[in-house]
Image (tube, rainbow, N blue to C red):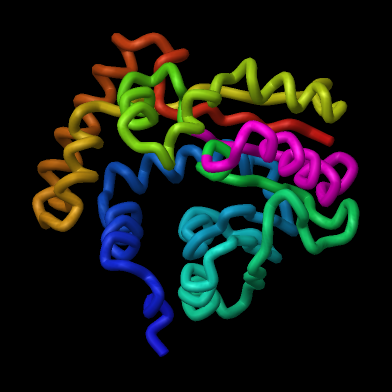
């Protein structure tokens, strides 16, 4: 059976856009380098999708959790040496203190406000003492993401994504003693354009990648960090 058999063409195109666009790939790599800086051996990825994280990381043991059976089927075919489990991030099917790093990327903003803290509490529960819990979420103060939240109902949770919002939850969990966090990247009009033209080959060309890199570099010098694309937070248990 085709592992993508239950995916829509939009799902497939979106996935390929994320793995085939060179400058986007380098941006994503930077995010994973930050949260994997301690070189954890046993890792849990919540909202793992097609296992995209494994393109940027090499943990000794990786477990991915997602609600989509179609995405998990694809991931299990591509990464046979790792484990993938269908499940809910607010009720994880794992014992306490099992993982060195528990993280999620672009997942929390799809939950209701009432679900975010229970999921973060579950992430803390399954993390080993001395391990790390990490989140990567879109920044509500970034203009492009703010507009996306207003235009698309499924992205409305971005309006909650501020550093203050998440840091408060980490402190409530008793994880406020050692926290590393940063803003990362800017969403320029070029990134928005690559999304809408993700089926066109020119976005994968070297000249376009170099142009995007230069514009991003200028944008990062002009735009204050609090308006950059992502919020990245890493907290030690």
Q: Quadrant of residue 19?
A: bottom left
Relative to residue 47, is residue 5 drawn left or right? left
Relative to 181, say whether 31 is above or below.
below
Foreground pick, 145 / 215:
145
Does the magenta-highlighted stretch encompass residue 147? no
Foreground pick, 111 / 217:
111
Relative to 98, say whether 170 is above or below.
above
- Residue 136, given in percent of the width and then of the height, sits at 55, 37
Image point (23%, 45%), residue name: 195
Image point (57%, 54%), residue name: 47
Q: Quadrant of residue 129?
A: top right
Q: Pick the quarter of the image with the C terminus.
A: top right
Q: Pick the quarter of the image with the N terminus.
A: bottom left
Q: Which residues are magenta?
A: 110-137
Relative to residue 178, is residue 216 drawn left or right? left
- Residue 109, given in percent of the width and then of the height, sits at 54, 37
Residue 85 at least partly seen:
yes
Image point (52%, 55%), residue name: 53
- Residue 167, given in percent of the width and then of the height, sits at 69, 21
């Amino acid at each position: 059976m085709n592992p993508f058999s239950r995916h829509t063409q939009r799902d497939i195109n979106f996935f390929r856009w994320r793995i085939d666009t060179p400058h986007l790939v380098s941006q994503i790599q930077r995010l994973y380098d930050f949260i994997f800086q301690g070189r954890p051996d046993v890792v849990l990825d919540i909202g793992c999708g097609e296992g995209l994280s494994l393109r940027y990381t090499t943990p000794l043991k990786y477990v991915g959790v997602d609600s989509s059976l179609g995405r998990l089927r694809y991931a299990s075919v591509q990464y046979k040496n790792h484990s993938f489990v269908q499940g809910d991030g607010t009720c994880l099917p794992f014992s306490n203190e099992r993982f060195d790093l528990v993280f999620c990327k672009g997942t929390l903003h799809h939950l209701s406000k009432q679900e975010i803290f229970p999921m973060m509490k579950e992430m803390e529960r399954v993390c080993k003492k001395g391990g790390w819990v990490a989140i990567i979420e879109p920044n509500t103060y970034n203009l492009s993401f703010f507009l996306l939240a207003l235009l698309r109902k499924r992205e409305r949770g971005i309006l909650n994504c501020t550093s203050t919002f998440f840091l408060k939850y980490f402190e409530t969990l008793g994880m406020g003693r050692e926290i590393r966090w940063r803003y990362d990247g800017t969403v320029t009009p070029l990134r928005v354009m690559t999304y809408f033209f993700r089926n066109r080959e020119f976005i994968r060309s070297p000249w376009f990648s170099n142009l995007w890199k230069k514009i991003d570099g200028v944008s990062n010098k002009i735009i204050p960090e609090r308006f950059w694309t992502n919020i990245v937070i890493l907290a030690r248990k």
